[in-house]
Image (cartoon, rainbow, N blue to C red):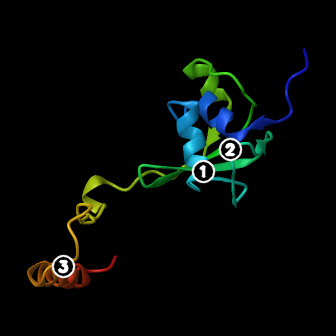
Amino acid sequence: MAEATTARVDSWLWAVRLYRTRSAATAACRAGHVRVNGERAKAAQTVRAGDEVRARQDGFDRIVVVEKLLVKRVGAPVAAEALTDLTPPRPPREEVFFVPVRDRGTGRPTKRDRREIDRLRERLDDLPDD
């Protein structure tokens, strides 16, 4: 049986264990979190050996190069051989800034909330640049 020359990007991402389920990989493609060779990828887009795939996970990009095509999920050691990970190391936890998020449905910020936001922004502006 001849080896495949192309594979769907969502299937490949699932097969090499970048996403836990194929539907999660498909949803990431639909949301625009997956890029193949710098272009936004749809779930059915094909990948070939040598393509660069960027997948956004937890606010950071995973950058991998396709080495071997897989369409079925395989064990972790085999999956590791199917890609080359070019992802830069994540910054230490203390360097990652906390971004405040308002709860959905809370409406517009009050005057007090606005003042707290302004104080926080002033403190962030006063931090030294490296």
Q: Where in the figure is residue 68, as x and y percent of width and height?
A: 75, 31
Q: Which mark is residue 117?
A: 3
Residue 4 placement, left or right of 96: right
Q: Quadrant of residue 32?
A: bottom right
State the quadrant of the C terminus: bottom left
What residue sits right under mark 2 in the picture? 43
Q: Quadrant of residue 117?
A: bottom left
Q: Quadrant of residue 116?
A: bottom left
Q: Is residue 83 visible?
A: no
Residue type highlighted by circle 1: Arg
Residue 116 placement, left or right of 75: left
Element assignment for label 1: helix
Residue most extreme to the left: 112
Q: Earlier in the sequence, mark 1 or mark 2?
A: 1
- At x 66%, y 28%, the residue is 81
Q: Which mark is residue 30?
A: 1
